[in-house]
Structure formats: structure tokens, C-alpha cells
Image (tube, rainbow, N blue to C red):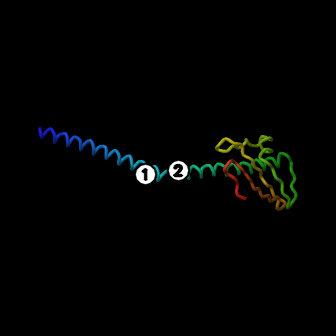
């Protein structure tokens, strides 16, 4: 009878040690998730910002084409503002949407500095993103 009690104690200890091992592994996984989570969120936000910056550059390219197609003359030291809606309406680019599927607004400011030199400054406003001026 004593052997049977000892056997049950040993069996109970084995079961408890397995539960402890599973619990420790679970805690380690949770800890790793909490450590990695901020880095993943930061990577996602950086990728979103990169997409918006690429869209700004697409706006600049579309603006250059718009000025050529419409024969727009900008005098030296003067500015012209071409809106995103103008570029979309002239089918030079598609409408830009935020990650929440809300339409973005924007424009490209074109400054003619000399006979051959133009400066293009894009501005884009999408939900939580806004071009730094």
C-alpha cells in the first residue's frame, strides 16, 4: 500500500512539473511578444510613412507632366500651386487614400528660380499623416 501511495506522489509530481514547464514556456512566449510588439508597430508605422513619401514623389512627377501637358508658364521667382485633385482629374495619377481608406488632400508648390530651375515642394495630408513644411 505504501508503494501505491509513493507511486501516486511521484505521478502527481510529474504532472505538476509538466504544468510548471508549460506555464514557464507560456510566460516566456508572452514576454517575447511584449518585447517585440513595439518594434513591429514601429516598423509598420515607418512603412506607412514611406508609402506616403513615395506618393509625394509621384505627385511631383505628375505635376511636371501636368505643367508640360497644359503648357503652364511660371515666371521666374513666382509660385504655382497644383492640387492633387487637378492631377487626378487630368488622369495623371490616382486618388490617394489613407490606411483608414479616407481620401487624402494635397498639392505641389512649384517655384521657378531661374530659366531652367524649378523647385517642387509636395504637401500631402492623409488622416494621421501630414507632410512636414
Residue at screen point 70% across, 57% down? 132
Q: Nearer the viewer, mark 2 or mark 1?
A: 1
Query: Is residue 113 found left or right of 18 in the rendered image?
Result: right
Q: Secondary structure at mark 2?
A: helix
Q: Position of residue 15 (x, y in %)?
A: 26, 41
What number of labels is visible?
2
Q: Which residue does the numbered mark 2 point to in the structure image?
A: 40
Residue at screen point 81% across, 58% down? 111
Query: Is residue 84 found left or right of 13 in the rendered image?
Result: right
Residue at screen point 88% across, 58% down? 75
Q: Position of residue 121 (x, y in %)?
A: 75, 56
| Dot label at residue 31 | 1
Q: Is residue 125 above or below residue 133?
A: above
Q: Position of residue 67 (x, y in %)?
A: 82, 49
Residue at screen point 72% across, 46% down? 104
Q: Quadrant of the C terminus?
A: bottom right
Query: Is residue 10 found left or right of 90 in the rendered image?
Result: left
Q: In the image shown, does 57 or 31 lie closer to the viewer?
A: 31
Q: Residues within 10 Å of mark 2 (few under 14, many from 20)?
A: few
Q: In the image shown, does 116 or 113 lie closer to the viewer?
A: 113
Disc 2 to disc 1, C-alpha distance: 15 Å
Mark 2 and mark 1 lie on one chain; the one further toward the N terminus is 1
Disc 2 + disc 1, Cβ < 8 Å: no
Q: Secondary structure at mark 1?
A: helix
Q: Quadrant of the N terminus?
A: top left
Q: In the image shown, does 68 or 36 lie closer to the viewer?
A: 36
| Dot label at residue 59 | none
Q: Position of residue 14 (x, y in %)?
A: 24, 43
Amino acid at each position: 500500500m505504501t508503494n501505491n501511495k509513493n507511486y501516486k506522489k511521484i505521478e502527481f509530481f510529474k504532472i505538476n512539473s509538466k504544468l510548471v514547464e508549460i506555464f514557464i514556456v507560456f510566460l516566456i512566449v508572452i514576454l517575447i511578444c511584449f518585447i517585440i510588439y513595439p518594434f513591429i508597430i514601429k516598423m509598420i508605422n515607418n512603412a506607412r510613412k514611406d508609402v506616403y513619401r513615395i506618393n509625394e514623389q509621384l505627385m511631383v512627377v505628375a505635376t511636371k507632366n501636368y505643367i508640360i501637358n497644359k503648357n503652364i508658364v511660371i515666371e521666374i521667382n513666382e509660385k504655382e500651386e497644383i492640387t492633387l485633385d487637378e492631377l487626378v482629374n487630368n488622369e495623371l495619377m490616382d486618388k490617394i487614400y489613407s490606411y483608414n481608406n479616407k481620401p487624402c488632400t494635397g498639392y505641389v508648390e512649384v517655384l521657378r528660380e531661374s530659366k531652367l530651375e524649378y523647385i517642387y515642394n509636395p504637401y500631402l495630408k492623409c488622416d494621421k499623416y501630414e507632410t512636414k513644411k
